[in-house]
Image: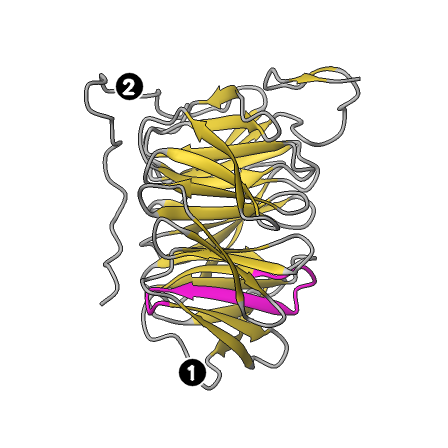
Amino acid sequence: TAPPLQPPGPPAVPPGLPAPPLPPAPPPLSPAGVRVFRGHTDSVVSVVFGEGDELASAGNFDGTVRFWSLESGEALRTLHTGAMVVLDIALSPGGARMASAGFDSAVKLWYVPTGTLEQRLLGSSPHTETVTAVAFGRNGTILASASYDRTVKMWHVESGKLLKTLKHAGGVKAVAFSADGRYLASADDAAVKVWDVRTGKRERLMRGHTFDVTALAFGAGSVLASASEDDTVRTWDVESGKELRVLKGHLGMVTAVAFSPDGSAIASGGYDRTVRLWDTDTGSHFHTLLGHSDDVLSLAFSADGALLASGSGDRTLRAERGACGGAGRGGGADHWGRPHGG
């Protein structure tokens, strides 16, 4: 049977090392450049940027998706998904549709402007266990869903038709599409699988992590990042299957990873309650964001790269301005201290 979902626990510390000091709790009033969003009654397990001024977040055991104003920090509306637990959300390109996944084994599609449920994706063979992750393909016509039933399913969004079922040996925890829509990455253990979207054939099996992979994200071109319970992030070239970099620094399992829009930077977060920023090319760590008082569980960059949002077990969502991989890369340094070439 598939492994049970484990709730976030205390930060894991390698043997022989002292426990890291706990970052301070988020302040009632945000400092300059940081906005804190409060309202979820449980861990914020997924965060995505919407169109314009909106940010969306999902709360684990509160079963809701909340839409926030980036300008005011206020909750604009709350969507009750009907699931006891929500584990992931994804927005289609353009932001008109949202997919949600959770304990009820259902993949649900919502029309964002009205918050109405459009359809439940069942097809000829629906998921039979918890759905852990969802991701839209490049143009929003295909949706992938990962489940503890040991499958990834690809769906045609408009018709709800099941296109392909990709079988795994264990419960699948993560799924991501490449930017060009050619590849789909998934993970059900310590290895990363890469699939051809058109044929459904597995093209790569990439090994390197020593414990299960928890999150996946594609950057520019064929670069993929994987976060793991082994406290590392690894980057890969999916065309060759070659491991590119191993990013070490977290003092506990890494549960979230995201690329800046131009692919030049990687953000990672985990059980040490920090968000760390890395240079994609060199693998060097250039900044650490503090502020969460519990595990960091989700990350997302805004489309212009100017904002990085993080969701946490402390029930808050933080958005920090840093101009990473966005405008203003002509020289000097960004808000997070990384030097830029001229």
Question: Is residue 147 found inside the magenta-colored segment of the image?
Answer: yes
The disc at residue 125 is 1
Q: In this view, does 59 lie to the left or right of 335?
A: left
Residue 205, image x, y percentages: 46, 55
138 and 273: which is toward the camera: 138
Residue at 52% from the left image edge and 76% from the top image edge: 164
Looking at the picture, which amino acid does disc 2 mark?
Pro
Residue 76, given in percent of the width and then of the height, sits at 55, 49
Residue at horizontal 47 percent and vertical 21 percent from the top: 288
**Residue 340 got which mark?**
none
In depth, the one of 282 and 48 nearer the eye is 282
Q: Distance between the residues labelled 1 and 2?
A: 46 Å
- The residue under label 2 is 20
Q: State the SS at label 2.
A: loop
The segment highlighted magenta reads 136-150
Q: Can residue 299 be seen in this view?
A: no
Residue 336 lies, in percent from the top left, at 59, 19
Foreground: 61 or 72? 61
What is the crowding at mark 2: few (fewer than 14 residues within 10 Å), some, or many (at least 20)?
few
Residue furthest out toward the left: 16
In this rendering, the count of numbered labels is 2
With 258 as the anchor, is 326 left or right in this view? right
Say what amino acid the circle numbered 1 marks.
Ser
In the picture shown, does residue 158 fall above or below 226? Answer: below
The quadrant of the image that shows the C terminus is top right
Q: In which quarter of the image is the N terminus?
A: bottom left
Q: Write the residue at 31% across / 43% down.
A: 211
Mark 1 closeness class: few <14, some 14–19, many ≥20 residues within 10 Å: few
Q: Is residue 100 magenta?
A: no
Residue farthest to the top, as pictured: 332
Looking at the image, residue 197 lies above or below residue 283: below
Above/below status of 111 relative to 61 = below
